[in-house]
């Protein structure tokens, strides 16, 4: 019987399969929404949030800022904004200072003629023109550094948005994994170890019995 058992004995293989189904979750904060299910995780910025606006601004303006960096120009957005602000403050402060601190006190004491006041305003205008010209030269000299600073600020804010997305995705996946259901299934596979050579010996074995 030992010979029959070794030649014709069957064997049974048992296989266990584990299946995990992640729970559907939605994780959100004021800036990011993440949705996770068994197919994966999708995230997006909350419409109108700070990170959403930063993302749109950077994508819309990065080309012009890069161009300003590599080709400095007075016509750049940054330089025009700085120049306009400088001119506005210069004109307002200079005119106010001349009027309040010089012309008005002298006029109150009848110590100034209209022609003298006119010359003062003319000199003021010439001085402002000279100051603006100097500021323009300074702007062009510092233009590349200003553009580099803007690029750094833009990209820093941009990356912070995607760091927020990454953190929210991780939290969403963690929550979904905690809600996951796991199913184990088993299957058996019976097989015979009978070989071709044993089949050929079968008639002789039967005669020996």
Image (tube, helix red, strand yellow):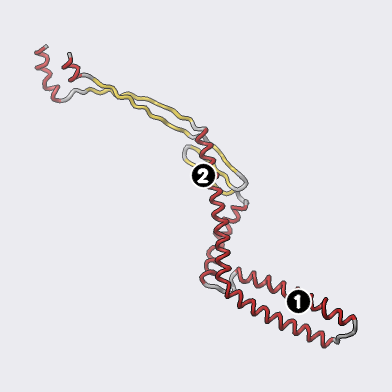
Image location (x, y in percent) of residue 157: 58, 56
State how far apart marks 2 and 1 are (Cα): 57 Å
* Residue bearing the label numbered 1: 94
Q: Residues within 10 Å of mark 1 (few under 14, many from 20)?
A: some
Residue 200 placed where, x, y %? 11, 22
* Label 2 with label 1: CB-CB less than 8 Å: no
**Total numbered badges shown on the rendered structure:** 2
Asked where in the image residue 10 lies, by quadrant, the reply is: top left
Q: Residue at x 52, y 72 (%)?
A: 71
Which is more toward the observer, 197 or 128? 128
- Relative horizontal placement of residue 88, taking residue 45 as reference (left or right): right
Judge depth for marks 2 and 1 and give the one in front.
Answer: 1
Q: Is residue 143 left or right of residue 203?
A: right
Q: Is 192 on the left-hand or right-hand side of 181?
A: left
**Dividing the image into 4 quarters, which one contains the C terminus?**
top left
Image position of 124 (left or right of 140): right
Closer to the chain start, of discs 2 and 1, is: 2
* Residue 76 percent coordinates (x, y): 58, 71
User: Which residue bears the numbered disc 2?
Assistant: 42
Label annotation for residue 110 = none
- Indicate whether 110 appears above or below 139: below
* Residue 109 vertical position relative to residue 2 in the rendered view, above or below: below
Q: Residue at x 26, y 21 (%)?
A: 11
Find residue 15 and report its horizontal and vertical position in percent.
34, 27
Q: Residue at x 86, y 85 (%)?
A: 112
Task: Please tell me which residue is depicted at 22% across the width and 19% down the height of the picture.
Answer: 9
Dot 1: element: helix
Graded by Cα atoms within 10 Å as few (under 14), some (14 to 19) or many (20 or more), the crowding at tag 2 reads: some
For label 2, the SS is strand
Q: Quarter of the image holding residue 107?
A: bottom right
Residue 61 appears in which quarter of the rendering?
Answer: bottom right
């Amino acid at each position: 019987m030992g010979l029959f058992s070794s030649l014709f004995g069957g064997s049974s293989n048992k296989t266990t399969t584990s299946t995990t189904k992640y729970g559907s979750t939605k994780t959100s904060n004021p800036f990011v929404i993440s949705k996770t299910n068994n197919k994966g995780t999708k995230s997006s910025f909350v419409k109108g949030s700070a990170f959403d606006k930063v993302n749109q601004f950077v994508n819309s303006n990065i080309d012009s800022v890069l161009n300003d960096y590599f080709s400095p120009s007075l016509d750049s957005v940054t330089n025009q904004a700085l120049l306009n602000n400088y001119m506005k403050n210069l004109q307002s402060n200079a005119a106010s200072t001349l009027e309040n601190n010089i012309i008005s006190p002298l006029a109150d004491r009848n110590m100034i003629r209209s022609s003298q006041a006119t010359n003062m305003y003319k000199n003021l205008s010439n001085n402002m023109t000279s100051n603006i010209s100097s500021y323009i030269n300074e702007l062009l000299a510092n233009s590349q550094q200003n553009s580099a600073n803007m690029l750094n600020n833009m990209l820093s804010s941009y990356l912070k948005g995607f760091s927020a997305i990454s953190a929210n995705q991780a939290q969403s996946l963690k929550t979904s994994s905690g809600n996951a259901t796991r199913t184990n299934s088993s299957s058996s596979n019976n097989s015979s170890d009978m070989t071709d050579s044993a089949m050929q010996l079968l008639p002789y074995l039967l005669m020996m019995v």
